[in-house]
Image (spheres, helix red, strand yellow):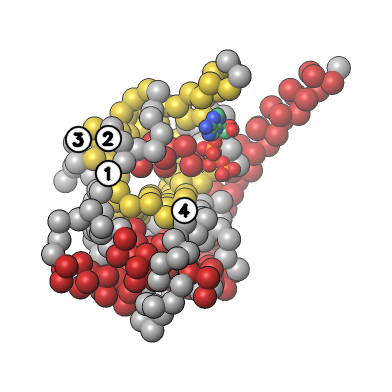
Amino acid sequence: MGALLTLDGVGKTFDVDGKPVAAVDSVDLAIAENEFVSIVGSSGCGKSTLLNIVGGLEEATAGEVRIAGKPVTGPGRDRGFVFQGYSLFEWKTVAGNIRFALEKSRLSRAEKAERVEHFIDAVGLRGFENAYPGQLSGGMRQRVAIARALVYRPRILLMDEPFGALDAQTRGMMQELLLRVWGDHKVTVLFVTHDVDEAVFLADRVVVLASRPGRIKREIRVPLARPRPYDIVADPGFVAIKREILSDIREETLKSMQLALGSTERSLY
Ligand SMILES: Nc1ncnc2c1ncn2[C@@H]1O[C@H](COP(=O)(O)OP(=O)(O)OP(=O)(O)O)[C@@H](O)[C@H]1O
C-alpha cells in the first residue's frame, strides 16, 4: 500500500532581515494511512515549520508535500490541527465550538448534530456540552480542540505540542485518551513534541530532526505492542528507544548551542 502523506525534498528558507535562514532542509518522509508519527528535535530545529507546511499554513520553498498523491497547495478539510494554545471561541459552548468546525460542511442539520454528539462522547465531555471554555480545565479545553479537529473527519491530524501546557498527570491521561480516539477513528497523526517519553509512548515511528537546518537525523520504529499501558515507560524496550532518541537530541542541542556560542563570541570580540 502506498503512503497517504509524502514529503519529497521539502525545504523552507525564511528571509530574516534580508538574509536567508534555512529552517527545514531536504525532508523526505512517507507516512502510511493510520500511522502515528512523532517529530522531536532540539528547540528551533524546524518541527513547527514542517508541520505548518504539511498543514498548508506555510509554503515550502523547496520540494513537495502530497496527500494521496495530490500536491498540497494550502489548508484543507483533509487535515485537522491541534495547537498548544487553546484556540477555542470563549463565547461559544463546548458543543458550539465543535459544531463551528462543521459550519461550511454540506452535511444535514441532523448529521451535524449526530457528529457533534459522537465527538463529545469520544473525548469524554458528556455533561459539559453546554459549558463555556472559561469553565473548563486545560485538559478539557484540549479535548474540545481534539473533538473540533476530528469532527469533520480529516484524514490527517496535525498536533503541535498539544499537551505542552498541561501538568504531568493530565498530560498522561490526555495521551491515553488520544490513543483511544486514534484507535477508534481512522486517522493519520503527525505529532510534534519536546517530550521524548510522550513521543515514544504515542508513536509507531519517531522522526528525530537535526538542528539548523531541520533535516531528518534518524527515524526510529517503536515496535511496542498496543494497547500500551501507561507504565510501559519502564519497559526495557521503551527505555532503549528513549535512550537512543535522547542521545540524538543531546548531540543536536550541543551542536546548535556551540553554533550560537560561536556567533556570540564573534560578535563580542
Ligand atoms: N516566520 C518566520 N520568519 C523567520 N524565521 C522563522 C519563522 N518561523 C520560524 N522561523 C525560524 O525557523 C527555525 C525553525 O523554527 P520552528 O518554530 O519551526 O522550530 P521548532 O523546532 O518548532 O522550535 P521549538 O521547539 O522551539 O518550538 C527557527 O530558527 C526560527 O527562528
Q: Which of marks 4 and 3 is nearer the N terminus?
A: 3
Marks 3 and 2 in Cβ contact (< 8 Å): yes
Give the image location of residue 264, x and y in percent. Answer: 78, 25
Q: Which of marks 4 and 1 is nearer the N terminus?
A: 1
The quadrant holding residue 204 is: bottom left
Question: Alpha-carbon distance for marks 3 and 2?
Answer: 6 Å
Q: Is residue 119 visible?
A: yes
The quadrant holding residue 52 is: top left
Q: Is residue 253 left or right of residue 3?
A: right
Mark number, residue 60: none
Q: How crowded is mark 3: few (under 14 residues within 10 Å), some or many (20 or more)?
A: few
Give the image location of residue 210, x and y in percent. Answer: 53, 35
Q: Mark 2 points at which residue?
A: 72
Give the image location of residue 43, x and y in percent. Answer: 60, 42
Marks 4 and 1 in Cβ contact (< 8 Å): no
Q: Which of the two discs, 4 and 3, sits closer to the camera?
A: 4
Q: Mark 4 points at which residue?
A: 83
- Front residue of 162 and 198: 162
Q: In this view, does 108 lie to the left or right of 218?
A: left
Q: Mark 3 points at which residue?
A: 70
Q: Single out the residue that lies furthest toward the right.
A: 269
Ligand 1 closer than 8 Å to label 4 CB = no
Marks 2 and 1 in Cβ contact (< 8 Å): yes
Mark 1, secondary structure of its residue: loop
Question: Alpha-carbon distance for marks 4 and 3?
Answer: 25 Å
Q: How crowded is mark 1: few (under 14 residues within 10 Å), some or many (20 or more)?
A: few
Q: What residue lies at 37% left-to-right and 23% top-to-bottom?
A: 62
Mark number, residue 76: 1
Marks 4 and 2 in Cβ contact (< 8 Å): no
Q: What residue lies at 74% left-to-right and 22% top-to-bottom?
A: 263
Question: Alpha-carbon distance for marks 3 and 1?
Answer: 12 Å
